[in-house]
Image: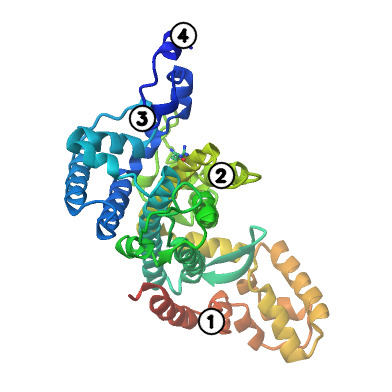
Amino acid sequence: MKKSSLDKKNNNKIWGGRYSTSPSELMEEFNSSIQFDQILYVEDIEGSIAHSEMLSKQNIISKKDFLSIKSGLEQIKKEISNNQFHFSSKLEDIHMNIESRLVEIIGDAGKKLHTARSRNDQVATDIKLWLRKKIDEIELRLKNLQQTLIEKSEIYYDLLMPGYTHLQVGQPVTFGHHLLAYVEMLGRDRGRLLDCRKRMNELPLGSAALAGTSYAIDRHFVADKLGFSKPTENSMDSVSDRDFAVEFMSASSLIAIHLSRLAEELVIWSSDRFSFIKLPEKFTTGSSIMPQKRNPDGAELVRAKPGRIFGNLLSLMTVLKGLPMTYGKDMQEDKEPIFDTVKNIELCILNMDGMISEIEPIPEKMMEALQKGFPTATDLADYLVANLKIPFREAHHLTGKIVLLAEKKISSLEDLTIEDIQSIVPGVDLSILKVLKIKNSVSSRKSYGGTAPKNVLKAIENAKKRFLKG
Ligand code: ARG
């Protein structure tokens, strides 16, 4: 800490009035958020223009002042977007950097902008405006990913592959059916985002520092201008609420979970033991030492990102817990986790979309794994129940013996002869052989939501209607 900085008179034009010293340099750096909240400049300016228009409509400031505030703010927006703006950490944050520059540009009229508001309602408004846009963007990206998955499932609606439980072959399914499972997850994710968007879409501005204001402001007008459904109801809640950010981050955590599960499948499927798919080369990387490698780094990163995305959620929840009403500087710690979550969830969705759109299944490998995995064993047991009236538990047991026999003969269930089966279940006829065919097993799963290719085609049409129209 440099002593000289303590001795100087406070040079903060915005709140330095009652101060006789400047903050320590250490404090200045600690306290300022401009390094990361400058990302909010568009929304900050948008909010200020709507606020000043309302002040002028209500005769709190003159029309002339409003117009010069507006043109000053528009100039600042250009300066920032052209990288011609000097951000200062002495001015703490984006709100004060913009306001201070406004006064430089337009003079005294600029000093009227902060009438009937505070940074507390301002920052809550800025984040909501910013996040609302990002939610729309993320929601659209999820929709695009659903479209990619649906297009692939249309191509592979009848491609046979093993369906797993415990990562052991369970029953045959189609690749299209498997991909559509993710379309459902992403559909729920979109629903959660929209739900959160709807709840957060209330305007905090005009709540001022915490108690409202004595000026005759019109919050409904500002809400309307900024596309909020209405102003918030309670001024204290307005400035202290970050539920919307927690909700967004928790919705993002679920998206991250879903994408990481798909990413893990891509890693497994593309491994040389499985070889079910080829990942597009563009989303893999080589090894610096092992020349033969094509590592699934894109998928691995999507698999790993929940680490930070959950971390961000936990970080904000921890900041908020136990925080007394209303605003506390603690809340400045909301921003980096929110921004980081948005950035990373977008990257995950985009990269996943890129990988899925060029994924190439290898049908022979899927079939090979199917045949080794005796996936029609359940069909066989069901057949014994239906045709020989054997109780299911007993049929299960007998089927187990048939599987053991196939294993001993190093054969698939499909390749067993009728004699083989009759040696365990005397009295069965040739019709049992049909049941052992993998293809027949899949096409028999016609129950609603089941994997029969005919169902998958219907499910695709249904998914298009539910998720892609509009
Ligand atoms: N930079 C601050 C934040 O992000 C803005 C609000 C400051 N309010 C205050 N009373 N110091 O939270």
Local crowd size for mark 3, using a 10 Å CA cut-off: few (<14), some (14–19), many (≥20): many
Find ligand 1 in the image and state its quadrant.
Answer: top left
Sequence-earlier tag: 1 or 3: 3
Sequence-earlier tag: 3 or 4: 4
In the rendered structure, the answer to whether residue 24 lies left or right of residue 315 reads left
Which quadrant of the view contains residue 112?
A: top left
Please name the residue that numbered disc 3 is placed on: 91
Q: Name the element at disc 4.
A: helix
Name the amino acid, label 1.
Ser
Spatial CA span between label 1 and label 3 = 68 Å
Vertical placement of residue 48 versus 454, above or below: above
Please name the residue that numbered disc 4 is placed on: 3
Spatial CA span between label 3 and label 4 = 20 Å
Name the amino acid, label 3.
Leu
Spatial CA span between label 1 and label 4 = 81 Å
Please name the residue that numbered disc 1 is placed on: 443
